[in-house]
Every structure is written in structure tokens, then in C-alpha cells.
Amino acid sequence: ILNVEQSPQSLHVQEGDSTNFTCSFPSSNFYALHWYRWETAKSPEALFVMTLNGDEKKKGRISATLNTKEGYSYLYIKGSQPEDSATYLCAFQVWRKLQFGAGTQVVVTP
Amino acid sequence: DAMVIQNPRYQVTQFGKPVTLSCSQTLNHNVMYWYQQKSSQAPKLLFHYYDKDFNNEADTPDNFQSRRPNTSFCFLDIRSPGLGDTAMYLCATSRDREGLLTYEQYFGPGTRLTVT
């Protein structure tokens, strides 16, 4: 069983503040690292698929970095807004399957 | 819009009473997955179909079965639900493209199942 760990489990952010959280994964047999955003009552939505060590991806105010040698990825939210409130899941790809972490629940308060 | 649809969104069933959850997709993807997510835990893959080929995970209980009658539809059958099967069930799809190593998955909104 591959362990994908996310920390913290939850965090509260004031509107306008920036935040970041971590996903750690096995550093061997790496295919790809996926990030998803899951808002309540909606479908999980793909944010990034990261494949190369040192990869940095950005989508609006959200960005992610990848370190495959040490087995971690950071996701950053700049200038958090209430609409960023969601659970952020990372997933380590093994072949055509994803091994998920338990997620980081982000609550942005006005 | 192309999408993954799950029905019902909420299901309450009694202990031991068979239940079927439905997933359909308009993406024409050849791979379909079923996940189980219990409260505050990681989504756990139960099984997946690659075209018509069924791939079970080693630790998926026999109580869980699946059917894929065509490309668009996939069903999750729980033959005798127990209280421990209360969870969110997510369906996802992806497309296998030659030479592409990444499998981005597209999810439905899930079915929240409660066993009483």
C-alpha cells in the first residue's frame, strides 16, 4: 500500500491571506502527481497534473510545485477568497490508477 | 457539456438490502473507476474497467460488484450492505491515449450512501 500523506488536515484562512499545504508521496516509481479541488456537493475538479521534478504549475491564484526526488508537492493559494473554500486532494499515479491522500480542507472566512 | 453523472445523489438503504449505484458518462472515455470515501479518509479505489476488462483491487470485499454494459454506463452493486459501507461513492473516467503516461480522471459528484 502506497502512503500519500497530506498536511494539515484542515486550515482556516482569512480572506486575502495566502496559504500553502503539503502532499508527500513515495519517491520511487513516479508517474505523475495530481491535484484536485473538491467543493461541497460538487464533483472533484482537476487542478494540475505534474510529471517532472521541479515542475511548477499555475492556475489563477493557485500554484503547485513538485519535488519527485524527495517525494513532496506544495500547493499555494495567493490572496485567498471565500470561493477557494474546498477540500484539496492530491493523488499519486501508479500505472492508470490514483492513490489519494485524505485531503486538506480549506475554509476561507471573510 | 460532457460530464460524469451519478444517480442517485443520496441513497439510504437498510442493512442487508441490495443497492445499486449508477454512473454514466458522455466523455466517451474507455476507463471507468469506482471509489469509496469514508468520512475524513482518502478516496479508496474499489475497481476499474479498462474497456470491458474488469480490474478488482485486492482488498475490495466480495460484497461489492460492478457491471459495465456499454461504454457509457457503469454500475456498483452492493449485495448485502453493512453499516460499515456507509460512505461517499465516487465514479470517475479517464481516457487511455497511446504514448500518454498520465491518466487525468474526471469525476462525478458522488452518491452518498447511508446504511441503517
Image: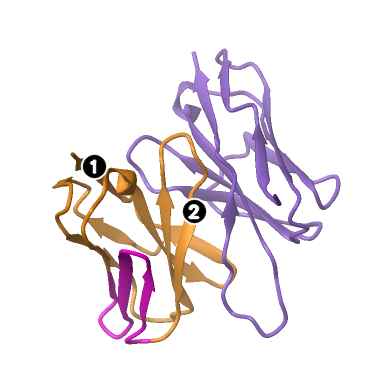
Chain colours: A orange, B purple
Give the residue displayed 55% in from the left and 64% down from the top.
A97
Neighbour tally class for label 2: few under 14, some 14-19, many 20 plus, Cα within 10 Å: some
Task: List the single residue furthest toward the right.
Answer: B70
Numbered disc 2: what chain?
A: A
Neighbour tally class for label 1: few under 14, some 14-19, many 20 plus, Cα within 10 Å: many
Q: Position of residue B47 (x, y in %)?
A: 62, 51
Q: Position of residue A11 (x, y in %)?
A: 18, 47
**Amino acid type assigned to the residue bearing label 1 in the image:** Val
Give the residue displayed 45% in from the left and 47% down from the top.
B43
State left or right for residue A52 relative to residue B81.
Answer: left
Q: Is residue B2 above or below residue A52?
A: above
Both marks 2 and 1 on one chain:
yes
Numbered disc 1: what chain?
A: A
Does the magenta run of residues contain A72?
Answer: yes
**Amino acid type assigned to the residue bearing label 2 in the image:** Glu
Q: Is residue B24 above or below residue B15?
A: below
Give the residue displayed 76% in from the left and 50% down from the top.
B26
Label 1 sits on residue: A107
Q: Position of residue B27 (x, y in %)?
A: 73, 56
Comes first in the chain, label 2 or label 1: 2
Q: Position of residue B94 (x, y in %)?
A: 65, 62
Label 2 sits on residue: A45
- Give the magenta range: A53-74
Who is closer to the viewer here, A19 or B72? A19
Q: Secondary structure at mark 1?
A: strand
